[in-house]
Image: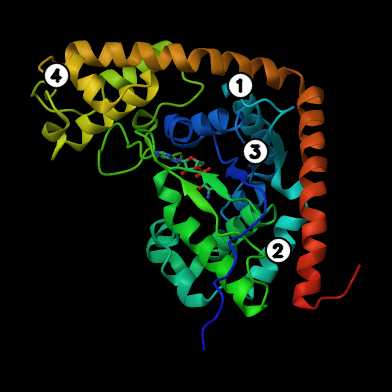
């Protein structure tokens, strides 16, 4: 028996992404994700979330969390996301996320989650003592994306496995409930030289908020002196910069600095090496620090300005949550029907 090919997902293309409000954002968040948020808003319907439900999966300060959400929202806007165009909101203000996550908990399989490397990295030897929420974190992430039937998700490379899980959950829901193409299989948008920014002290570790050394990262709010200092002290080797990308092999710290330069200056790695190949780090590092400061200083300034007027910022987030709810609430009614849950 031959079966007709399944029609592809026919819904609109839509972009969704999010960041955790756990401490300040850094250059990895900026180059891996935020730069893409800004670019995509001109071509697509975009929804950008501050994921506070994810932030409570580990120890957090309840008194600081709301303000940390405002800081991330301010960073989105300061970097160039236009809240009139894109939707900016806080995850816990929209009920669909937690509700869909529960339904997806009953679709995802333990074995799928047990394979998630980010949980293993975060939990280390203490998995038994971690919250169930931390283990379940990628299911909530799938719910974030699919509550809007988002088709494209701009993220850094560290999120690739979570995006694959979102696709698995969407496909499994569609087939378990005999609802072909109800959910799209969301595509990660990862490409570009900023997709994996590494620690300035150790080229084998990604730049991260949780690294105990502040010297390992450039924070979005660092001033020009701090930026210059951190790049000056960044780990390199005694050799000059290579002439070609081939010469970066086996030199992860150098590759990282060249990648950061390329991403900030909107150049290819080859173009950067064309200019800097054969030259020393004594000249390259201050040039890199200058470009970083030029990009980040206006963002930090605008963030400070936005954070002064808390009422205006909260109004933007309220409006964003209402627009997000207007998309996700009708979708959740359909999901409730498909799953056989009680009608509200
Ligand atoms: P979070 O807050 O850890 O990171 C936010 C974004 O920054 C990217 N990123 C990096 N990119 C390049 N180099 C780095 N060193 C680096 N560090 C972080 C991350 O890939 C991410 O794009 N799980 C998500 C939050 C989330 C989400 C979602 C994302 C929750 N629900 C739905 C997309 C869609 C996270 O870890 O964010």
Q: Residue at point 44% right, 11% down?
A: 294
Sort mark 2 into few (<14), some (14-19) or many (20+) by Cα contacts within 10 Å: many
Question: Which residue in the protein does label 3 denote?
Answer: 46
Decide which of 198, 23 is in the foreground and name it: 198
Give the foreground label among 1 and 3. 3
100 over 17 or under it: above or below:
below
Q: The residue tagged with tag 2: helix, strand or loop? A: helix
The residue that mark 1 highlights is 78
As drawn, the residue found furthest toward the bottom would be: 1
The mark nearer the N terminus, 3 or 2, is: 3
Whole-percent x, y for residue 218 in the image: 41, 26
Q: In this orientation, does residue 217 appear?
A: yes
Left or right: where 181 falls relative to 266: right
Between discs 1 and 3, the one toward the N terminus: 3
Residue 278 image position (x, y, % from top left) = 9, 17
Foreground label between 4 and 1: 4
Secondary structure of the residue carrying tag 1 is: helix
Q: Which residue is labeled 4 in the image? A: 277
Is residue 134 something one can see in this rendering? no
First of labels 3, 4 by sequence position: 3
List x then y, in percent, for residue 277. Answer: 14, 19
- CB within 8 Å, label 4 to label 2: no
Q: Position of residue 191 (x, y in %)?
A: 39, 40
């Amino acid at each position: 028996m031959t079966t007709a090919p399944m029609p592809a997902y026919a819904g609109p293309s839509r972009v969704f992404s999010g960041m955790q409000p756990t401490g300040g954002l850094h250059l990895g968040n900026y180059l891996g994700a935020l730069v893409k948020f800004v670019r995509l808003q001109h071509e697509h319907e975009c929804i950008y979330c501050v994921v506070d439900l994810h932030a409570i999966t580990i120890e957090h300060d309840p008194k600081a969390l709301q303000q940390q959400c405002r800081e991330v929202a301010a960073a989105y806007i300061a970097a160039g996301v236009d809240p009139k165009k894109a939707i900016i909101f806080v995850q816990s203000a929209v009920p669909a996320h937690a509700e869909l996550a529960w339904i997806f908990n009953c679709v995802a399989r333990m074995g799928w989650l047990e394979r998630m490397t980010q949980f293993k990295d975060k939990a280390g030897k203490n998995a038994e003592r971690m919250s169930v929420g931390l283990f379940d974190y990628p299911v909530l992430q799938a719910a974030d994306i699919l509550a809007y039937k988002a088709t494209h998700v701009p993220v850094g490379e560290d999120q690739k496995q979570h995006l694959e899980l979102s696709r698995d959950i969407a496909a499994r829901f569609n087939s378990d409930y005999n609802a072909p193409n109800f959910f799209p299989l969301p595509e990660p948008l990862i490409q570009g030289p900023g997709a994996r920014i590494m620690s300035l002290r150790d080229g084998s570790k990604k730049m991260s908020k949780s690294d105990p050394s502040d010297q390992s990262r450039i924070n979005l709010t660092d001033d020009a002196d701090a930026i210059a200092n951190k790049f000056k002290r960044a780990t390199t080797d005694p050799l000059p910069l290579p002439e070609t990308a081939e010469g970066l092999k086996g030199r992860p710290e150098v590759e990282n600095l060249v990648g950061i330069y390329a991403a900030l200056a909107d150049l290819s790695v080859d173009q950067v090496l064309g200019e800097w190949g054969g030259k020393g780090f004594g000249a390259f590092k201050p040039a890199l620090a200058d470009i970083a400061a030029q990009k980040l200083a206006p963002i930090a300034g605008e963030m400070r300005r936005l954070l002064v007027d808390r009422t205006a910022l909260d109004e933007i987030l309220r409006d964003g949550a209402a627009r997000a709810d207007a998309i996700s609430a009708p979708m959740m009614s359909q999901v409730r029907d498909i799953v056989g849950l009680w009608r509200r």
